[in-house]
Image (cartoon, grey):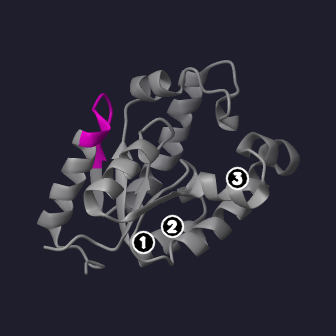
């Protein structure tokens, strides 16, 4: 079975979307991109600055425009921001344009992987564990709504996760495969 020509990786912050996405792109021979990086490239500023000036709503509008453009590209593994599924239009784009892989990760792994990161606006709070738990409760149903494949990524090496995704893609015969 051939590999899909558009693979979108969703999941919470700290799940390894960018790292796994790069590994998956290497394994598949597809290009790699990231919606957060695209927003930063288009604006010339980091996401924290956008949140400061435009709030989350302004960032989400920019994120949707980046997803609209990137999800049209052929031959791409696309890592997305953790909150991309909060917008109905984004869920429609993801589900309608490619195969969606949800990287699931436990809160402890998310905390560990984001512990030194000061550039995540939604984690600039007193109780990061409580915030991550709240975000997961809100977003997990949305991730699952659009996911074709769900993979547990917590506590695993990116290469192992990418290989599992490859195996699952081959085994499922999902639409969008070329």
Q: Secondary structure at mark 3?
A: helix
Q: Position of residue 51 (x, y in %)?
A: 78, 45
What label sits on residue 141 in the rendered view?
none
Mark 2 surroundings: few (<14), some (14-19) or many (≥20) residues within 10 A: some
Q: Are marks 1 and 2 in contact (CB under 8 Å)?
A: yes
Displayed quadrant of residue 35:
bottom right
Q: Which residues are magenta?
A: 151-159
What label sits on residue 40 in the rendered view?
3
Q: Quadrant of the C terminus?
A: bottom left
| Camera-side mark, 2 or 3 | 3
Q: Which of 142 and 79 lies nearest the eye of the viewer?
A: 79
Question: In whole angstroms, how far apart are the C-alphas of marks 1 and 3?
Answer: 24 Å
Question: In whole angstroms, how far apart are the C-alphas of marks 2 and 3?
Answer: 21 Å
* Residue at 54%, 32% in the rendered image: 132
* Residue at 51%, 55% in the rendered image: 80
Displayed quadrant of residue 166:
bottom left
Q: Would residue 120 be found to the left or right of residue 105 on screen?
A: right
Residue farthest to the top, as pictured: 126
Residue 155 is one of the magenta-drawn residues: yes
Q: Quadrant of the N terminus?
A: bottom left
* Residue at 47%, 35% in the rendered image: 14
Report the residue marked by disc 1.
95
Residue farthest to the right, as pictured: 53
Q: Is residue 60 visible?
A: no
What label sits on residue 91 in the rendered view?
2
Q: Earlier in the sequence, mark 2 or mark 3?
A: 3
| Camera-side mark, 1 or 3 | 3
Q: Position of residue 92 (x, y in %)?
A: 50, 73
Q: Secondary structure at mark 2?
A: helix
């Amino acid at each position: 079975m051939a590999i899909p020509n558009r693979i979108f990786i969703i999941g919470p912050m700290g799940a390894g979307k960018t790292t796994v996405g790069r590994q998956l792109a290497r394994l598949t021979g597809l290009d790699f991109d990231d919606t957060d990086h695209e927003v930063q490239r288009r604006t010339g500023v980091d996401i924290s600055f956008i949140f400061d000036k435009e709030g989350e709503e302004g960032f989400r509008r920019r994120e949707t425009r980046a997803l609209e453009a990137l999800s049209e590209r052929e031959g791409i593994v696309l890592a997305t921001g953790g909150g991309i599924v909060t917008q109905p239009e984004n869920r429609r784009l993801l589900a309608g344009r490619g195969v969606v892989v949800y990287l699931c990760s436990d809160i402890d792994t998310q905390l560990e992987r984001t512990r030194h990161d000061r550039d995540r606006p939604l984690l600039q709070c007193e109780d990061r564990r409580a915030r991550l738990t709240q975000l997961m409760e809100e977003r997990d149903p949305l991730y699952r709504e659009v996911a074709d494949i769900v993979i547990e990524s917590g506590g695993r090496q990116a290469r192992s996760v990418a290989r599992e995704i490859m195996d699952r893609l081959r085994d499922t015969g999902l639409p969008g495969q070329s």
